Amino acid sequence: MSLTAETAARATDESAEATPGAAPARTTSADSAPRRPSLSPSRAADFKSCPLLYRFRTIDRLPEKKSRAAVRGTLVHTVLEKLYDLPAAERTVAAAQTLVAPAWDELREEPGVAELFEAAAEGQPAEKESLEAWLASAGELVETYFRLEDPTRIQPRGREELVEVTLPDGLLLRGYVDRLDVAPTGALRVVDYKTGGMPREAFEAKALFQMKFYALVLWRTRGVVAAQLKLLYLKDGDALTYAPDEAELLRFERTLQAIWAAIERAVATGDFRANKSRLCSWCDHQALCPAFGGTPPPFPAGAAAAAGWRTALPLAGD
């Protein structure tokens, strides 16, 4: 499977860690379009932070520029995924570093990636970091991983694995787990790689939102509450671990259902409000945002209906 096909699919579902809103993306091309409207961790986070951003990404599907930080995250994720293709004894730092170049050769073929490293257009400043320095920084993140875990002692049950479940109320939850480990006892560990730095304690709950999402889906599909949720922060070589319980996952499920109900109301009316925050600095859509003096395009009711959304708004031509 080509990295391009993998990335095109998960890009609509997952968010990045290094740059808010962008995401490393890997899955099969067959999953590029969800069968019906669904909720992923990143899209839930989008709606919570800014309903209008959710609309632009999920309903309008407006294009967004790639960033070096997000592409580096994809590269590092790919290398760590492929590392576990090697026999356990061969999973060394040196072996992992040899995976960076071929992974980059595939990744650079994706639209918009190579352009990040070309000379800036006339009248625009060039990025200071060279491609060589950027690749070296990705290699450093890969090396940091080995300070956090010993991959020769781990045999993942799943890597970049799609997990999904339909709740009794019809809500479809979908997400992609970086790595799923299963102990001989049946205990589950969910692992996610982050190329950014570890959040301050006040923001740990936000960081764990994604992991609780995965834990909920796994509990509903396997009947087992994950023994450990583990976030590996490769920028500073630290880890955040958490052990959820059944009661907490039930509360989290109700939270997701409330978010989904709010999304459905917004789609039905076309009313997606902008929410100005510090995250706006990374947003590609300021020109269309009322918070910055812009005007959103007309709500695409026809496209929403075609994608399976229920809306009370008139369709084009009605």
Image (tube, grey):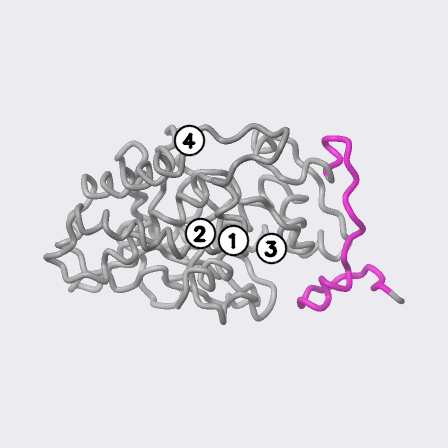
Q: Residue at coordinates 56% horizontally, 55% vertically from top-left?
A: 257
For marks 1 and 3, the one nearer the N-term is: 1
Q: Is residue 234 left or right of residue 213?
A: left
Q: Is 27 covered by the magenta stretch?
A: no
For marks 1 and 4, the one nearer the N-term is: 4
The type of residue carrying mark 2 is Arg
Question: Horizontal and vertical percent for residue 75?
Answer: 37, 49
The type of residue carrying mark 3 is Trp
Mark 4 Cα-neighbour bin, 10 Å: few <14, some 14–19, many ≥20: few
For marks 3 and 4, the one nearer the N-term is: 4
Q: Is 315 covered by the magenta stretch?
A: yes
Q: Nearer the viewer's eye, disc 2 or disc 1?
A: 2
Give the vertical position of 291 relative to 261 (above or below).
Answer: above
Q: Nearer the viewer's eye, disc 3 or disc 2?
A: 2
For marks 2 and 1, the one nearer the N-term is: 2
Mark 3 Cα-neighbour bin, 10 Å: few <14, some 14–19, many ≥20: some
Q: Nearer the viewer's eye, disc 1 or disc 4?
A: 4
User: Tags 3 and 2 in contact by the CB under 8 Å rule?
Assistant: no
Give the vertical position of 241 relative to 292 (above or below).
Answer: below
User: Tags 2 and 1 in contact by the CB under 8 Å rule?
Assistant: no
Q: Determine which residue is flagged by label 2.
A: 108
The type of residue carrying mark 4 is Glu
| Residue at mark 1 to residue at mark 3: CA–CA distance | 10 Å
- Determine whether the residue tagged by mark 3 lies in a helix, strand or loop: helix
| Residue at mark 4 to residue at mark 2: CA–CA distance | 16 Å
Q: Which mark is residue 129?
A: 4
Front residue of 85/247: it is 85
- Determine whether the residue tagged by mark 1 lies in a helix, strand or loop: helix
The type of residue carrying mark 1 is Arg
Q: Determine which residue is flagged by label 3.
A: 260
Front residue of 154/200: it is 154
